Image: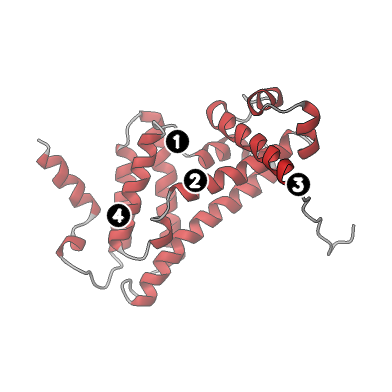
């Protein structure tokens, strides 16, 4: 194949596409629960209800299936954060997104980030998987950055603010907070990490809409704790 040629994606019938999606969904759920290493193709076949010939018709091997699992899990993770992730263009919007992330972690019973779990298992084992995961995090990072860039364009953030770096700090807070929350069985590390990351963004703010927006995330958490005493 010539260097400038790209392989064309395979096309499937509606039935074939549905079967393929069922395989990917089953593998995605299994690998989140049991890990990639702990999930066999036999497990995937059993849960998805397909035969070995069907599975190999759509995927050359387990590595090919894992790449599709990363893509599916990326979509799930990003979709679960909507509509907040698509409108991170103010400090209140960032706080609402923060609250949504915390709720998602509680719903998942502190099992950690699906993408983070895949990265932890695969980043040093498979270069194709590492690159696919890096692309996934880059998409997530870009979604956060877009909102911060709008804030700066509107004048809500100082011209010196760097949306790219601020977005990376927020995403790092999410990943580190989720890892510690998973390890400690407590949402507090996640809450504190996000509060401090948003506090950092707030330091670049040039103006706020009202008095409530001046209250930092950390101050809100402290007030809540005080009121509960």
Q: Which residue is drawn at 40% across and 32% down?
A: 110
Along the viewing direction, whichever of 52 and 160 lies nearer the viewer: 52
Residue tagged by mark 4? Answer: 95
> Which callout, 3 or 2, points at the residue further toward the start of the chain?
3
Residue marked by disc 1: 112
- Pointer 2 or 1: first along the chain: 2
Instruction: Give the number of marks.
Output: 4
Crowding at dot 2, Cα within 10 Å, few <14 / some 14-19 / many 20+, comes out as some
Cβ atoms under marks 4 and 1 closer than 8 Å: no
Considering only vertical position in the picture, is 87 above or below 195?
Answer: below
Earlier along the polypeptide chain: callout 2 or callout 4?
2
* Residue pictured at 44% horizontal, 49% vertical: 172
**The C terminus lies in which quarter of the figure?**
top left
25 lies left or right of 198: right
> How many angstroms separate mark 2 from mark 4 (CA)?
18 Å
Q: Which of marks 1 and 3 is nearer the N terminus?
A: 3
- The residue where tag 2 is placed is 77
Determine the secondary structure under disc 3.
loop
Counting from the top left corner in percent of width and height, residue 112 is at 45, 36
Image quadrant holding the N terminus, namely bottom right
Point out the tag, 4 or 1, that comes first from the N-terminus. Answer: 4
Q: Which residue bears the numbered disc 3? A: 13
Query: Is residue 66 visible from the viewing direction of this image?
Result: yes
Q: In this view, does 209 lie to the left or right of 189?
A: left
Q: How crowded is mark 3: few (under 14 residues within 10 Å), some or many (20 or more)?
A: few
Q: Can residue 160 be seen in this view?
A: no
Q: Residue at x 20, y 46 (%)?
A: 221
Q: Marks 1 and 3: which is nearer the front?
A: 3
Label 2 SS: helix
| 92 shown above or below 59 | below
């Amino acid at each position: 194949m010539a260097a400038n040629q790209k392989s064309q994606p395979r096309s499937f019938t509606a039935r074939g596409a549905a079967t393929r999606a069922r395989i990917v969904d089953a593998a995605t759920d299994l690998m989140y629960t049991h890990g990639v290493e702990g999930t066999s193709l036999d497990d995937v076949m059993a849960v998805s209800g397909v035969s070995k010939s069907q599975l190999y018709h759509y995927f050359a091997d387990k590595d090919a299936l894992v790449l599709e699992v990363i893509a599916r899990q990326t979509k799930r993770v990003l979709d679960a954060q909507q509509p907040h992730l698509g409108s991170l263009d103010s400090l209140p919007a960032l706080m609402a997104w923060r609250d949504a992330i915390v709720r998602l972690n509680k719903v998942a019973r502190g099992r950690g980030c699906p993408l983070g779990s895949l990265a932890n298992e695969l980043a040093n084992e498979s270069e194709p998987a590492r690159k696919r995961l890096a692309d996934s995090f880059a998409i997530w990072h870009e979604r956060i950055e877009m909102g911060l860039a709008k804030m700066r364009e509107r004048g809500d953030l100082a011209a010196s603010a760097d949306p790219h770096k601020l977005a990376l700090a927020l995403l790092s807070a999410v990943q580190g907070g989720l890892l510690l929350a998973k390890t400690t069985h407590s949402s507090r590390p996640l809450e504190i990490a996000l509060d401090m990351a948003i506090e950092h963004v707030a330091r670049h703010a040039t103006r706020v809409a009202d008095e409530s927006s001046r209250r930092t995330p950390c101050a809100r958490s402290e007030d809540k704790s005080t009121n509960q005493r």
